[in-house]
Image (cartoon, rainbow, N blue to C red):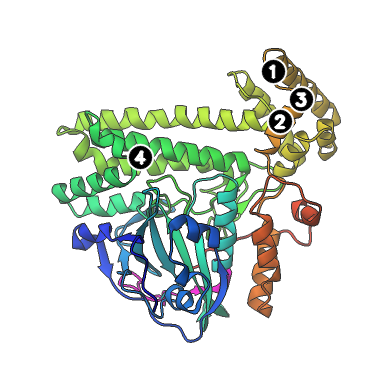
Amino acid sequence: MPATPSDFNVEHSYQRLPADLFASCRPTPVAAPQWLAFNQPLAIELGLPEQFWATETGLQLFSGNALPAWCQPMAQAYAGHQFANYVPRLGDGRALLLAEIINSTGQRFDLQLKGAGPTPFSRGGDGRSPLGPVIREYLLSEAMHALGVPTTRALAAVSSGETVYRDDPLPGAILCRVAKSHIRIGTFQYVASLGDQHQLAEFADYVIARHYPHCAAQPQPYLALLDAIIAAQAATVAHWMSLGFIHGVMNTDNMTISGETIDYGPCAFMEAYDEKTVFSAIDRRGRYAYGNQPAIALWNLTRLAETLLSLLHATQPEAIQLATTALENFGLLYRDAYLQRMAAKLGITAPEPDDQQLIDDVLQLMQQDQTDFSQFFRLLSQQDPAAAGELFGDKANWQSWFARWQARVDQQALTSSQTSGQRQLAMQQLNPALIPRNHLVQQAIAQATEHGDLSLFNELKHAWQQPFVSKPEYQAFSQPATAAERVNRTFCGT
């Protein structure tokens, strides 16, 4: 194997934490790996040596068949509330953290293999992944990145040449996921459950140093950490909501402390606007419906705050008060971030409190007429914004709302130098022409799984790199699903 460049900076800082927070283990080799995809721009950003770029050496690494010396694979331990039911020990059941890469700008990233075989946390599972979930996560995570959402990334995907048995036999695959870290709210729950105050403080200090170093200089660093995580999650969820994204499984073990979107199992993008939209087949009561996501994020953050109480203050009543005040700030942060994003989608650059009513009213009109969320905002950003009215059956209410909106942006124009053309361009940079529509994702999965055909996967992967650009060749990808194409249920990939 060629020598790794001397400037390739790799660490394993997580392994310096107490040993009961992870388990060292190696991937299980696969029979006949083949390349599915490799993300060269991300490899460049990471500073990954070129010998691993879509090469045979890279294939052996990303299949888990032959790891270079700089990899020290391990599975992380964590707990979690799954649909509000607490599970004290979950952990990486089909994922292995290989290494932490520090790139040329000093940013630290985890490299993790998903589907690389059983770990001590597999609970009887095979630790493998079918091809479909790998394709879904590759497409969705990279599309989310292109849309500007904090997210994990996909560096590489390989087929295993083996069959994975679920309800049916399926081709297997492995994904290499990249994240600022894989530390979750559930990780804090697990550490706190061990009952070791010194260990909890050591872990919180590690998180501060890695993700929120400014907190270390604050008078109350652990309260500052809680504040920082709350702010990161408020911003991310507001971004989701502005795009019609539905995570689908917002368990505490699926929510990162960095604010990155993680775990793309049953996720989907809403088409017809409805606050109650649910796609996940396992979310039978709609706990994680689109409109519930902000409240669930706060519920999850409350579970995080509970783990930190002993670090916030020596006396529990005072600790609870500090945590409560911090959690109350989530609503303010979320509402501000949501107003900023939704107003900007309407071309309003300096939103005022009254603009929330304008937003609420058009969403109510969209819900009434089951209007396509993304299509409406994109049409409104075009040269003839009135054309968006073609999506509505209730013309009278549409025209009333449109007149109010037009008056609002005209008023803005009087106090700013922004022309209508500039406003339209700014709106187009926020209202995507393309989103990962569920039927397209499912079609790509079906073609790859049933026929070994990656053509649509590759086409979508390329198209979704520039979601805010309208291109004639991708016009079909901007259209909502027909009744025959519609995907109403999505599934976890485990």
* Foreground tag (3 vs 1): 1
Task: Say whether disc 1 or disc 2 marks the residue closer to the N-terminus.
Answer: 2
Q: Position of residue 176 (x, y in %)?
A: 46, 66
Of all residues, the one furthest to the bottom in this rendering is 31
Q: How far apart are marks 4 and 2 (CA)?
A: 32 Å
- Count neighbours of disc 2 (C-alpha within 10 A) and say few if under 14, some if 14 to 19, many if 20 or more: some
**Considering the image in quadrants, where does the N terminus appear?**
bottom left
Q: Distance between the residues labelled 3 and 2?
A: 21 Å
Q: Which of marks 1 and 2 is in front?
A: 1
Name the kind of residue labelled 1 in the image.
Ser
**Residue picked out by circle 2:** 362
Give the amino acid at mark 2.
Val
Query: Quadrant of the rendered structure where residue 139 is?
Result: bottom right
Q: Where is residue 106 in the image (x, y as percent from the top left)?
A: 36, 49
Which mark is nearer the camera, 3 or 4? 3
Q: Which one is nearer the viewer's eye here, 284 or 54?
A: 54
Alpha carbons under labels 3 and 1: distance apart: 10 Å
Residue type beneath disc 3:
Ser
195 horizontally vs 79: left or right: left
Looking at the picture, tell me which residue is in the foreground, 176 or 288: 176
C-beta proximity under 8 Å, tags 3 and 1: no
Q: Main secondary structure of the magenta part?
A: loop
Q: Give the range drawn in magenta.
A: 117-133
Under circle 2, the secondary element is helix
Cα distance between the residues tagged 1 and 4: 44 Å
The residue where tag 4 is placed is 302
Circle on res. 417: 1
Which residue position is annotated with label 3? 420
